[in-house]
Image (cartoon, coloured by chain):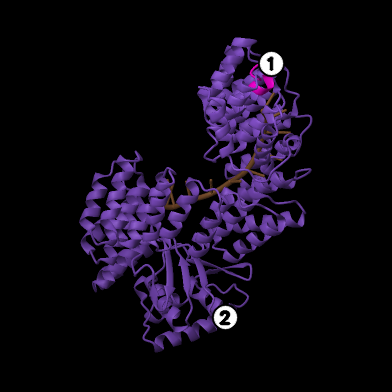
Amino acid sequence: MLLNPSRARGLLDGIPRRRPAAACYYRAAARDRADGDEDALAAYGTMLARGARPDAYTFPPLLKAVAARRGATSACSAPAAVHAHVVKFGMCRSAHAASALVFAYASGGDGAAARAALLELELGRGASPVAWNALISGHCRGKRFGESCRSFVDMVRAGAAPTAVTYVSVLSACGKGRDLLLGAQVHKRVVESGVLTDLKVENALVDMYAECADMDSAWRVFDGMEVRNVVSWTSLVSGFARLGQVDRARDLFDGMPERDTISWTAMIDGYVQAAQFKEALEMFREMQYSNVRADEFTMVSVITACAQLGALEMGEWVRVYMRRQGIEMDVFVGNALIDMYSKCGSVERALEVFKEMHSRDKFTWTAIILGLAVNGHGEEAIDMFHRMIRVSEAPDEVTFIGVLTACTHAGLVDKGREFFLSMIHSYKIAPNLVHYGCIIDLLGRAGKITEALETIDQMPMTPNATILGTLLAACRVHGNLDVGELVAQHLLELDPDNSMVYVLLSNMYAKSNRWEDVRRLRQSIMEKGIKKEPGCSLIEMNGMIHEFVAGDRSHPMSNEIYSKLGNIITDLKNVGYFPDVTEAFVEVAEEEKQKVIYWHSEKLAIAFALLSSEPNTVIRIVKNLRMCLDCHNAIKLISGLYGREVVVRDRTRFHHFRHGFCSCKDYW
DNA sequence: TTAGGGTTAG
């Protein structure tokens, strides 16, 4: 198992060095984390080069630095390399070095080597609780929570006495691995062992229960604590937030005696998880007023909120803020930025971030593939997938959603089918409903309605409303009324209040001049009292998010907006626009219907943008529903007439309007 | 060797 020292030296030499550091500097550098991790390795190299001999105190910080180097190609071999040096310099008998080795192996994912190192200790003078703790916490650091829990059980079986550190580590593993059963058992042991007065142990208990969604128990432990700190409170706040009880979390947060970066971030992220993105950004603003420093974690949550809101200006501002505050773009931040730019319809910027990133993971590749795919760059997305495979990053089920979406957008039916099969057979990924949705979309878009139907029949799971909705949309575009009626019927059985089904079906009847059926459909909606979910469009202007609901007059510039919209309609009519009211879902006079159509939320948002934004700038809108036919037509004309690029992200896809055309090629 | 917050689809 051991590597020979010269090979080990070679491995160590392969680890990139930053700047030459004096040997005496290495220990302090190792403690500095971040930069220190690499400095520690560089310093160790220098130390050897100068002929200094490492001692028992050399290896723990060095191994810690090695363990921290996650994701680097040398990471798995690095603990072995250092191990070789431990042997070479005769430090195997050092309990410190040995425990550090156990930790490095375990956190790097080499459980067998970690166990072997522990066993060696046991054969000698017996593994200390410190070595067991290294095993438990190492697995926890490496995100193998089950392994961490099993190590605790083994430790108890081996007769070693758990310490406070053991409990903290195993409780953390129980929480993150959602093992409430073992967590509660550990709790009992903690009570019996008398370490309950340790603040870190108590906090670990609160957090374990909170992570396992047992807020009653979390609260009980919290309530019984004599001393609490910001950690105790933050565990509760994020526990409630995770359960979607964001108001409860906020009440607690407001009642905290002190708040730090982590508590603020937990609260901001709570809003993000609850899809309250504006509140998340508001919270971030308050955090800045409170003079609490934000970090990489905070930025990820804030960037995610910007992504969901389509708030590109705010997202750009966040990058400036990061530069000013010296917050690094780590892989999480980079991934979130790629997603944000993609969701704002700016593929160019997403690609810039992608190129800038010095370390990439599966999420990075998946984010850029999806970003390219949904924004209509199917071929480039597929190229990216091949690059991903070349660098040996393993795709997962989400990556394939990106790849299949890419095929749909590029109209590559055969290629899509190929990818679908290779996902199953080469990558051993079982397709889920979303994958089938992609395939139905792929076939439907190409007009292969029969094949789409067959695919649905052959699916191992029951089709849901999304799948059938995709098929119905295909029927609409290709004018297949027979299948459309059938699908609509099924859909209404599944989801009787789905107004979208009525909209699409009535649209199809209208297209076939079956006005009697259109009337009947509307009648039935009126009788059933089905209300269409109100259309809502978001647009960001000068750092503010403006929200428009169809026909609403709540905006301060309402009068100007409606008058501008009137002018726009006149301009459009002069170039041949005629309002298409087939999707106007109200039983009123034709003239009224036109008004309803004119006042759709995206038209209001565009009128507002034309009033408020600089000429030639891109207009970006986020819509909650599928865009209607008339808005799609109108915006195509607007993009040509006013020379403005308009990007609309609707419920299902992106529409990039430019020079009178849309990137979706009128299929959506 | 020890407690709290982060990224991809629907």
Secondary element at image label 1? helix
A38 or A539: nearer the viewer: A38
Q: Is residue A264 left or right of residue A590?
A: right
**First in sequence: mark 1 or mark 2?**
1
Tell which subunit mark 2 falls on.
A
Question: According to the image, label 2 marks what residue?
Answer: A611
Residue A632, given in percent of the width and then of the height, sits at 40, 73
Q: Chain of mark 1?
A: A
Q: Tell me the quarter of the image containing the C terminus of chain A.
A: bottom left
Residue at coordinates 61% horizontally, 63% vertically from top-left?
A316
Kindly indicate the quadrant of the structure image that contains residue A410. Answer: bottom left
The disc label shown at residue A71, or none? none
What's the distance in space between the residues labelled 1 and 2, CA to CA?
70 Å
> Which residue: 38% across, 56% down?
A383
Q: Colour of chain B?
A: brown
Q: Is residue A216 visible?
A: no
First to last magenta residue range? A91-98
- Identify the residue under disc 1: A192
User: Can residue A626 be seen by looking at this rendering?
Assistant: yes
Q: Using the rendered view, name the quadrant where residue A156 is placed.
A: top right
Residue displayed at 63% across by 67% down: A543
Mark 1: give few (<14), some (14-19) or many (20+) Cα within 10 Å.
Answer: few
